[in-house]
Image: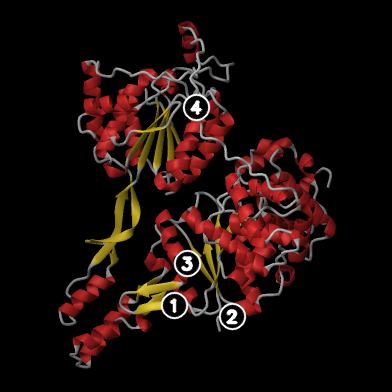
Amino acid sequence: MRHLDETVVGFARTLRAAGVGAHLDQVHAFFRALDEVDVLKESDVYWAGRLTLCADPDDLPRYDRCFAAYFSGETPRLVRRPAPPVVIFQQVPLPSRREREQGDDEPADVRLATASEIEVLRQRDVARLNAAERAEINRLIAMLDASTEERRSRRFAPASSGRLDPRRTVRAVLRGGGEVYRLHHRTHRRRPRRVVLLVDVSGSMSPYADALLRFAHAAVRSGGRTTEVFSVGTRLTRLTRELRHRDPDTAITAVSAAIPDWSGGTRLGAELKEFLDRFGRPGMARGAIVVIASDGWERGDAGLLAEQMAHLHRLAHRVVWANPHKARPGYQPLTAGMAAALPYIDDFVAGHSLAALDELAAMIGTGTGRRG
Amino acid sequence: MTQSTVSRTPASPAALAELLDQHEYLPDDGLATACFLALRMRRPLFLEGEAGVGKTSLATTLARVLGAPLIRLQCYEGLDAAQALYDWDFPRQLLHLRAAEAAGVTDVDKIESELYDRRFLVARPLLRAIETTPSVLLVDEVDRADDEFEAFLLEVLSDFTISIPELGTIHAEEPPVVVVTSNRTREVHDALKRRCLYHWLEHPSFEREVAIIRRRLPDATEGLAKRVAHAAQRLRAPDFLDGDLLKPPGVAETLDWTEALVALGARDLDPDTAAVTLGAVLKYREDTERVLKRGLGSLLDGA
């Protein structure tokens, strides 16, 4: 029989390889738990491990598999962690222009969209804007100013009315020799909610990506230091820093240099998963208003997108989806990605025109909270 | 002294299950082990699961088993330290100040130190749990509080010490037994869950549910309990009406339903009695409509 320490550490390694947290402090707890139970009883060991090493319902099936494999007497085989996604450049014939146009119309019977999967690594020229667009952007900036929805912070600030502030009042009373000449009040401080924008820059979205990124710039400029912007396509790119430039044109130029996958394909589910794993779950998406600007053309697995959207919905305060195609007459959310995401969206808007973006801004600003 | 909760803990998970059973809570192996380890290791127990699987009632039963008071902190958005930890009793402080003034006390330092005496401190659930030995602290629906509150809770739960600037540090003589529940409307930080024993509560199996009904409602006949439990299991099945039910019933609803049927004098569950009592088990109009549309016969079949 293997030594207990070795067995436990090996088991924890197996779990980590399978994607269960099994952090060091949890392994310590497992050791302590084993002291308390009958280590020769399989069910006791099973529960001691499950209670201490898992921290999420998603961990449970993985734990069960590892436990069965590891303690069945076989030599433990390390389950390889899934390799990081590698982008493979592949020459695939582009769908003809006609096909793409047909695709854009979203025929009612076609459920699986055929967005191109080729990652087109090329720079998108955004310098050529006409005057109308420029005016539109300026107006957007003006509209978004000081309009981020606020949430109540746990901390207090002095106020002219509200709950009594006992500490300050008593202090004042003492200073005045015991005379109550003024009651001090306090109220909860208000803090702006974080806004996170995920802008789809894939091929099918290219007519709108410009306007949406300019919208994102306006949001970053007016939303304070908590607003975050990412581009999604075949890669997740964080654009917040680039968008901090005061001048919209400079910002967009910087953005176009930063995005490696302009007008490529879409892997929304995988991108969303990456966003949640790297940024969202550690804190960025918690209590935030998350805006996804995409047409929902998912080339990958729509099931993954649904799963990730459910996850996002649980983390975020509100999930807003802006789909430019929504404005078309007779539009039905039939693309596999859109249909999968729909149950987890709080607000479904268009975002195809200035008026629609105005609506989106208002939604971010004054929208009522789902969990008021 | 610090051994008191531990020494009262039964020798094995099975013995604890027996005790919970005596107090009308029927745990499965996993839950019994979870409670056992929580008591032995003095680690908070983090319970997650759908609404109505018995998270809160476990805490109340555990308190009864240990003969300790249950101290409950119900979480909500905007919950702050003054509501969770402590607050100063402002009117009494001022009253004291006035009394001291009337008595002609002029020593300001003395008055000030008196003002921040323990007797002017209003203990909220967390402080109360730390001061009460033994006690069971239930932090209910932690997913409803803001995420900043989790960090704060984590701090309190890791050393069971609260420092009050005006008064000093209050340390728990013996850490309370802590049960934290979450309905998973929002994801709770990993750090908090790692600090706890994590248990995912499932709906009970058919046999266990029948046993729970029989135990809690002795007036219900065995046949009725079986029919109700069968219908409840059908309603919860993921493929029932394509999983479209907004709120599948929890154990609490099953018990309500049985109680309603017993009150009506029903000895069996048939479509007619089911139709008039459906409100006890389905809490959304849409759900009731869907089930009725499909026909109550199909729900009650095969029991």
* Amino acid on which disc 1 is placed: His
Residue shown at 50% from the left, 49% from the top = B187
In this figure, which residue is indicated by the disc labeled 1?
B171
Determine crowd level at label 2: few under 14, some 14-19, many 20+ residues with C-alpha closer than 10 A: few
Residue shown at 47% from the left, 40% from the top = A276
In this figure, which residue is indicated by the disc labeled 4?
A267
In what element is the residue under mark 3?
helix
Name the spot of residue A370 as percent of width and height, x first.
Answer: 44, 44
- Are the residues at dot 3 and dot 4 in contact (C-beta closer than 8 Å)? no
1 or 2: tag closer to the N-terminus: 2
Determine crowd level at label 4: few under 14, some 14-19, many 20+ residues with C-alpha closer than 10 A: many
In what element is the residue under mark 1?
strand
Name the spot of residue B50 as percent of width and height, x first.
Answer: 61, 51
In this figure, which residue is indicated by the disc labeled 2?
B3
Tag 1 and tag 2 share a subunit: yes
Left or right, A149 with respect to B102, comes to right
In this figure, which residue is indicated by the disc labeled 3?
B158
- Residue A345 seen anywhere in this rendered image of the structure: no
Question: Is the residue A79 above or below the residue B263 in the image?
Answer: above
